[in-house]
Amino acid sequence: IRTYSGLQYGDAPQGHKRFQGDERTPEGRYTITYGNEQSSYYLSLHIDYPNAQDRAYARSRGRSPGGLIFLHGQPNGLPYDARVPGDWTDGCIALSNAEIAELWSLVPDGTPIEIRP
């Protein structure tokens, strides 16, 4: 079990992600489904958002829940130990490059995760 703090979230970090474009990060229990070495960020792990509940909520309001949410490092091209300041993603969770490298080495596809505010 690992716990990370100092994470960086979507531009609107308060509240659970509900709709595409809301700039929020999903909260709750999800699963890592695959890793992407060719990401625009230093490594990325895909989260299975939206789940059935997320899709049903968005559908009931005539909206799309969005998707393509990842745990990832910092943007490629930055020095390895540099970080973009503040909350800056479109709903993903950004970690330091060292933290995502650790997760990458420890977390197989199918690993459950819990995202807490």
Image (cartoon, rainbow, N blue to C red):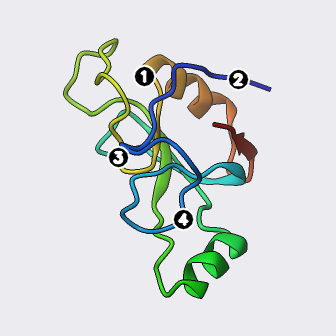
Look at the picture and state if 7 lies above or below 28: above
Residue 71 vs residue 17, the one in the foreground? 17
Q: Are marks 1 and 3 in contact (CB under 8 Å)?
A: no
Residue at the image position 70 percent from the left and 23 percent from the top: 3
The residue to which callout 3 is attached is: 39
Identify the amino acid type marked 4.
Answer: Arg
Mark 2 or mark 4, which has the lower sequence index?
A: 2
- Picture coordinates of residue 7 (x, y %)? 51, 27
Q: Residues within 10 Å of mark 4 (few under 14, many from 20)?
A: many
**Residue kind at label 1, given as amino acid type:** Asn
Question: Which residue position is annotated with label 4?
Answer: 18
Residue at mark 3 to residue at mark 2: CA–CA distance:
23 Å
Q: Residue at x 54, y 57 (%)?
A: 17
Question: Would you name the residue on which mark 2 appears?
Answer: 3
Q: Earlier in the sequence, mark 4 or mark 1?
A: 4
Quick one: label 4 or label 3, which is nearer the N terminus? 4
Q: Nearer the viewer, residue 105 or 48?
A: 48
Indicate the quadrant where residue 51 lies: bottom right
Q: Nearer the viewer, residue 42 or 87?
A: 87
Q: CA distance from mark 4 to mark 3?
A: 24 Å
**For the view shown, which residue lies furthest in the left direction?**
77
Q: Position of residue 117 (x, y in %)?
A: 63, 37
Q: Amino acid at mark 3?
A: Ser
Secondary structure beneath disc 2? loop
